[in-house]
Image (cartoon, rainbow, N blue to C red):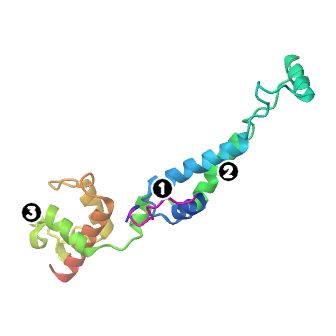
Amino acid sequence: QGCSALPVAPLPPTHLALAAAMAPPSCWILRALLAAAILEAGVAFVAGPPRWPPAAEPPSPAVAAAATGAERGQQRPSATEGRPLLLGAALGLLLAVSGWRGYPAVAEESREADLANGENIFLGNCAACHAGGGNAVQPDKKLKKEALVQYGMYDVDRIKYQITNGKNAMPAFGERLKGMDIEDVATYVMAMADKGW
C-alpha cells in the first residue's frame, strides 16, 4: 500500500499530523516530514523572538543595566535553554502520534500469507528445481509432505529459513526476495504439500 492511499493535496498542519498517524509503517516519508515540522515548530516556540532588542532601537534602562551586568561577568539568559527538553518531548510526541510499533518486518509477520503471490514466486524462482513438488538436484528431498516431515521441514518457519539462507545445493534467496514474498512462497509450499501437489 505504501503512501499511495494518502491524500495528495496540501494539508494544514493539524490534518498532516492526522494523516501521518494513519499512514502505514512503510510510509516513512510522511513520518519524517511530520518529525521535521514538529521539531521546527518546537524550536521556534522555545527560542521565540530575540530577547534583546535589535541594535537599531535604543536600549531601555533595564537592558542597559543587564548589559552592564554582563560586562561584569554575569551571563544573560540563553535563548536555547529549553531545547533538550523540547527535543525529547517532540520525539515522544512524534512516536505517539505516528503509532509506530516497530520496524516493518514485525508488521509483515502478522499478515496473512497470499497464496496467489506465493504461487507466482514459486513459479518464477523455485519451479526449475522443484516442479510438481519434486527435487531435480536431490531427488529424495522433495517438497511432498512425507519428505518434509521426514527431514524436519514440515514447518513454515523452517521453510522460510531455508529459502532465505539456502542449504547444500539450494541457493539463498534472502537478498533477492522480500520478507513477505518468502512468507508467501513458504506458505504456498506447505499448502501444496498438504494437497499432495
Measured from the top left, where is residue 88 in percent x and y?
Answer: 66, 47
Looking at the image, is mark 3 or mark 2 earlier in the sequence? 2
Measured from the top left, where is residue 20 in percent x and y?
Answer: 52, 60
- Whether pointer 3 and pointer 1 mark residues with C-beta atoms closer than 8 Å, the reply is no
Say above or below: 17 vs 43: below
Magenta stretch prevailing secondary structure: loop
Say which amino acid is labelled 2.
Ala
Is residue 153 visible to us here? no
Classify residue 168 by image quadrant. bottom left
The mark closer to the camera, 3 or 1, is 1
Residue drawn at 23 percent across, 70 percent down: 118
The label number, if any, that marks residue 89 in the structure image: 2
Say which amino acid is labelled 1.
Leu
Looking at the image, is mark 3 or mark 1 earlier in the sequence? 1
Provide the residue span drawn in magenta: 4-12
Which residue has dot 1 on it? 30
Image quarter (top left, top right, bottom left or bottom right) of the N terminus: bottom left
Q: Nearer the viewer, residue 151 or 184?
A: 184
The label number, if any, that marks residue 128 in the structure image: 3
Q: What is the CA distance from the residue labelled 1 to the residue labelled 2?
A: 19 Å
Position of 157 compared to 43: left or right? left
Task: Judge the density around disc 2: few (<14), some (14-19), many (≥20) Cα neighbours within 10 Å.
Answer: some
Measured from the top left, where is residue 18 in percent x and y?
Answer: 56, 64
Q: Secondary structure at mark 3?
A: helix
Classify residue 14 by image quadrant. bottom right
Queried whether the magenta region covers residue 71, the answer comes back as no
Looking at the image, is mark 1 or mark 2 earlier in the sequence? 1
Position of 34 compared to 88: left or right? left
